[in-house]
Image (cartoon, rainbow, N blue to C red):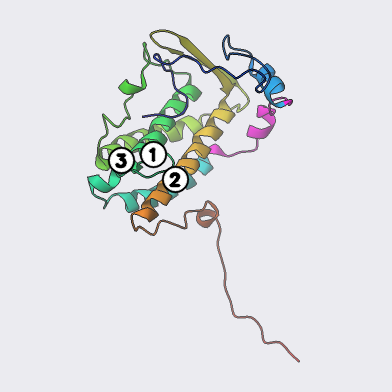
Amino acid sequence: MRRDYTLREDTPRPSRAPGEGSGRTSNWPPISEERRWTEDFGISPVNSSCMAQTIDFLRAYDVISQARERLFDWIRPLSQAQYTQAFPFGLRTLQTTMVEIAGTERWLAMRIREEPFPVPFSWDDWPISETRCPTFADLETAWRAQMPQTRATLAAIVDPGRIVENRMVGRQRVVTYRAAQGDIAMQLLMHEVHHRAQAMAMLRQLGVEAQDIDYIGFVQTVRREPRAPQIA
């Protein structure tokens, strides 16, 4: 199902080629995020608390939700064959792309709430997956059921700079994530926008005119009026 944030039990951590990046030969053992940014990029991480304090996560989610409804309207009439048709870009199919957006929303919201994850953790057992939501109707039902909780989660963020730690316990290893609540919320919002663009590109390949769901289109008013005659 997933491309990002995986806890793979059957694949070793990738190693770097000699001389690549910072020169480390392996990504294990883990190092601090600050050290990782410093060694890999020569810069320090962004000050999360300063950035996140100025963002209205709930308003942004509500606007993105309006755009999501249009995306739903475009996908709903498709056949199952179209929904699962493979394309040579992105996550290949509309099915995988939409499952990725909804499933990651659930995962990130749980991180913000500091909810424990199932043990042992497996994406194959995730409530929103291609196995559990094979059709778009299945996915839409599951996604709509979690939307109010996601919205409440974002509304409950009081201190966006507050650091939360989340552990995912697999069968062979434990992965610990540490980030500010505000940054996790930002990822939740931007992740959907990123992947919905891929979904729209797939829809256009299927002959659907998927366009005009920019954020600004849902929050601005536009007034058009005749131009006054010019006096020579």
Q: Which residue is mark 1?
A: 97
Residue 140: mark: 3
Disc 3 packing (10 Å; few <14; some 14–19; many ≥20): some
Helix, strand or loop under label 1 = helix
Q: Say whether residue 190 is left or right of residue 210.
A: right
Disc 1 packing (10 Å; few <14; some 14–19; many ≥20): many
Does 207 sit above or below residue 199? below
Q: Which residue is mark 2?
A: 198
Instruction: Tell me the residue at 54%/54% (across/down).
Output: 219
Give percent across and percent down for residue 16: 59, 19
Give percent across and percent down for residue 103: 38, 31
Helix, strand or loop under label 3 = helix
- Please name the amino acid that badge 3 sits on: Glu
Viewer-nearest of labels 3 and 1? 1
Among the 4 quarters of the image, the one containing residue 198: top left
Residue closest to the far front: 18
Of pointers 3 and 1, the one earlier in the residue sequence: 1
Q: Say whether residue 74 is left or right of residue 39.
A: left
Helix, strand or loop under label 2 = helix
Q: Determine whether label 1 and label 2 are within 8 Å by CB.
A: yes
Give percent across and percent down for residue 117: 40, 16
Instruction: Tell me the residue at 58%/12% (across/down).
Output: 30
